[in-house]
Image: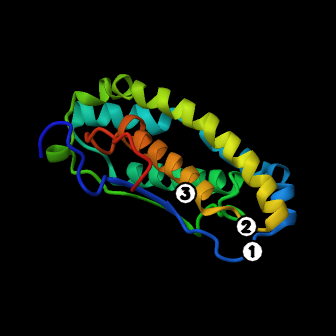
Amino acid sequence: MTVGQVPASYPVQFGVDYPEAERNRLTVAFRVVLAIPALIVLWVINTTRALLFLPPLLLILFRNKYPRWWFDWNLQLLRFENRVVAYLLLLRDEYPSTDEEQSVHLDIGYPDVASELNRGLPLVKWLLAIPHYVVLAVLGIAVTVTVVVGWFIVLFTGRLPRGLFDFTVGVLRWSNRVTGYACILVTDVYPPFRLAP
């Protein structure tokens, strides 16, 4: 594989099952209020956000290792965060579980640090990811508009159009790839600029 080439299957995979049944209009109408307890739990956990980045960076840099338990902690935290976000963005009606996968799937391959990760690259990955942050900020605005429009559509029709669903999932997929690359440092493969899997 040459530099800049993205493998067919990127090390960070994300997807959400499209809800085939009619949506629960009542929970959609009050989604922001219903999500408050999950958002509080997520906020408390995210006060330790530096734990996602700093220890793995130091361990990769100085010890050339990424402890499996630390990887598992980061993966489970990101999975929970994605369930909360999927619920808030109207992708699913199930209340976000703290431990069950539900219909939101995030899979990240455990890296072989010695052969897959460059020891010094974690120092600059955040800088290399700036173009992604800019694009994701613009896409975040588009997702906000999409969710507001989708909210009204679900209230009137009971279904979220597949196009709006796929766009929102694509932006979340892109964001998770950037997080895997620049924050939890599980891959040195530069994230692709695309919404598709």
Q: Residue at image x 55%, y 30%?
A: 137
Amino acid beneath label 1: Glu
| Tally of numbered tags | 3
Rendered view: 16 above or below 150: below
Q: Quadrant of the C terminus?
A: bottom left
Res. 13 image quadrant: bottom left
Q: Residue at image x 70%, y 41%?
A: 145
Residue topped by disc 1: 22
Q: Position of residue 41 (x, y in %)?
A: 70, 48
Q: Residue at image x 23%, y 36%?
A: 63
Rendered view: 192 above or below 72: above
Asked if the residue under mark 3 is in contact with the one under mark 2, i.e. CB atoms within 8 Å, the reply is: no
Asked if the residue under mark 1 is in contact with the one under mark 2, i.e. CB atoms within 8 Å, the reply is: yes
User: How is this picture coloured?
Assistant: rainbow
Q: Nearer the viewer, residue 74 or 96?
A: 96
Residue topped by disc 3: 166
Q: Is residue 7 left or right of residue 77?
A: left
Q: Count neighbours of disc 2 (C-alpha within 10 A) and say few if under 14, some if 14 to 19, many if 20 or more.
A: some
Residue topped by disc 2: 159
Label 1 sits on a secondary structure element that is loop
Label 3 sits on a secondary structure element that is helix
Rendered view: 121 above or below 56: above
Q: Nearer the viewer, residue 94 or 89?
A: 89
Q: Is residue 110 left or right of residue 76?
A: left
Q: CA distance from mark 2 to mark 1?
A: 6 Å
Residue 47 appears anywhere in the view: no
| Label located before the other in sequence (1 or 3) | 1
